[in-house]
Amino acid sequence: MRQFIGFIAVALVAFSSTNALAQPKQKASWKEMHDFHDVMSTTFHPAEEGNLAPLREKAGLLVERAEAWKKSAVPEGYNREKTPDTLKRLVKQCKKVKKGVKKGKTDAELTALITTAHDIFHEIMEKCRE
């Protein structure tokens, strides 16, 4: 009986450690993506509702965060060939937003520019994931 209980204990420990090892890897967190998203969400969503003040205030920061994201390493779980090109497009679009703010573009024009940047952001979030 002791041998049987010992066998069960060993089997449970072996099963537990095997099960822990079999857990799927979690995708690496991409800090620069989250940093960019923080600025995108505080500029795009108010713009959708006609409030362009946050966009005008944070256009430079939007470019800075997009550039930092582009320079960062693409983590596991994202397409390492497609993602960098899409990030280049995002930086380019964010620069257009900043330039539009600087030139005093209309609310409608700025909304169109930030909407395009937002669409590119979602392209990375959805189409660049593996």
Image: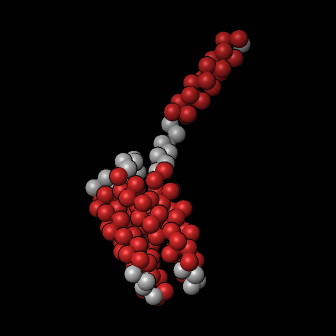
Q: Going by the picture, which residue comes out furthest to the top? A: 2
Q: Nearer the viewer, residue 123 or 50?
A: 50
Q: In which quarter of the image is residue 97?
A: bottom left
Percent x, y of residue 108: 46, 88
Q: In this view, does 93 lie to the left or right of 38?
A: left
If the image is split into quadrants, where does the C terminus sit?
bottom left
Q: Nearer the viewer, residue 102 or 28?
A: 102
Which residue is at a point 49% across and 86% down the rendered structure image? 107
- Vertical placement of 10 versus 80: above or below? above
Q: Nearer the viewer, residue 117 or 11?
A: 117
Which residue is at a point 35% across and 62% down the rendered structure image? 87
- Vertical placement of 13 versus 76: above or below? above
Figure coloring:
secondary structure
Residue 112 appears in the rendering: no
Which residue is at a point 31% across and 52% down the rendered structure image? 80
Which residue is at a point 42% across and 60% down the rendered structure image? 64
Total number of numbered labels? Answer: 0
Q: Going by the picture, which residue comes out furthest to the right? A: 1
Percent x, y of residue 76: 39, 47
Q: Is residue 40 left or right of residue 127?
A: right
Percent x, y of residue 32: 46, 53
If the image is split into quadrants, where does the N terminus sit?
top right
Percent x, y of residue 93: 36, 72
Residue 94 appears in the rendering: yes
Q: Is residue 65 left or right of residue 14?
A: left
